[in-house]
Image (cartoon, rainbow, N blue to C red):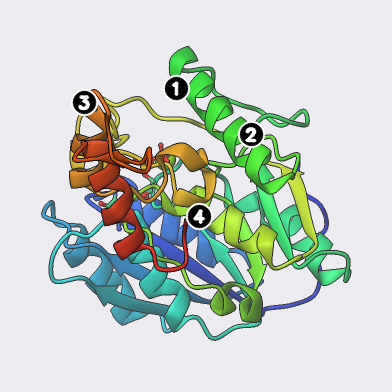
Amino acid sequence: MSASLPATSDVSVIMPVFNERATVESVLRLVLAQPCVAEMVVVDDCSTDGTFEVLTKLAESERRIRLHRHERNQGKGAALRTGISKASAEIVLIQDADLEYDPEDYAALLKPILSGKADAVFGSRFIGSHEHRVLYFWHSLGNQFLTLLSNMTTNLNLTDMEACYKVFKRELIQSVKLEENRFGIEPEIVAKIARTGARIYEVAISYHGRTYAEGKKNRLERRHQRPSLHPQIRPPAVRNFTTTERQGRRKVEQPKVGPKGERVGTNESKFTAEKKKELPGSD
Ligand SMILES: Nc1nc2c(ncn2[C@@H]2O[C@H](COP(=O)(O)OP(=O)(O)O)[C@@H](O)[C@H]2O)c(=O)[nH]1
Ligand SMILES: [Mg+2]
């Protein structure tokens, strides 16, 4: 179900890639078939399955592909940050390297920006009548929970914070400082874009989810890639504590009281003093 394509060819598609040899060529061809695509900034995150060789070959025959490679695997967030910094077209669109999302949806995603209503557009798999492959219940519940946490802190009413399709005016996305390296990049983008006061729209997209056997990355198995809750959506009580601080909090001793009624010699008082040193200005 695609809207008619607005007349522009000024879109930079950013594609983070890690070990996607089975799908990457098909995705590239589908993306490049969209007339709005001015360039594809592809960031290979040190793939080890031959993906980079496939990409190199494709880049030789298609001038719109700008290929970059990380020397070591750093994660989707790091690849997106590299890609966003290299984008040169007026509009930036994020595209995964698997076949779960459909570039035919670009027209609908671009429309709110091209018609002057939006500065950023997020795709949603949970609204509209587009087709969706039915897959993991707990995975989708996890997504909805993360979206809820994100909405509570941004006061936006998004329905799918984790969806891959996110579109921005280039100046907007390049003006926010992104820091997450792994999958925590999704809530970070939403939180930081929300904070700019940008006009955000949501658009229904189709979704052809893949199973883990088909190549989906298992975020929970690979502990180092677990989607961290970005500080923007962490409850304040667990924000900014160092490991030492957390250990200090766990072993709270009986408070000893000094001559003026103050607590002395406890982990709690050490914790407070340490925290004061580390967070100047806090009380
Ligand atoms: N650059 C980079 N991309 C990754 C990494 N892990 C996953 N990706 C890419 O991120 C996208 C989403 O990964 P996927 O496993 O489909 O996760 P999901 O669809 O968000 O559940 C795909 O294009 C992957 O190739 C990584 O370590 N580095
Ligand atoms: Mg995917």
Near-viewer residue (226 or 167) = 226
* Front tag of 4 and 2: 4
Please, which residue is most extreme toward the front here? 259
Kindly identify the amino acid type of the residue bearing the numbered disc 2: Arg
Marks 2 and 1, how far apart at CA? 13 Å
Near-viewer residue (33 or 265) = 265
For label 2, the residue is 125
For label 4, the residue is 188
Secondary structure, mark 2, is: loop
Residue 185: x %, y % from top left: 44, 54
Marks 4 and 2, how far apart at CA? 19 Å
* Front tag of 2 and 1: 1
For label 3, the residue is 253
Near-viewer residue (64 or 84) = 84
Q: Residue at x 21, y 58 (%)?
A: 51
Marks 3 and 1, how far apart at CA? 40 Å
Please state if 248 lies on the left or on the right of 169 as rendered.
left
Please state if 59 lies on the left or on the right of 31 as rendered.
left
Kindly identify the amino acid type of the residue bearing the numbered disc 1: His
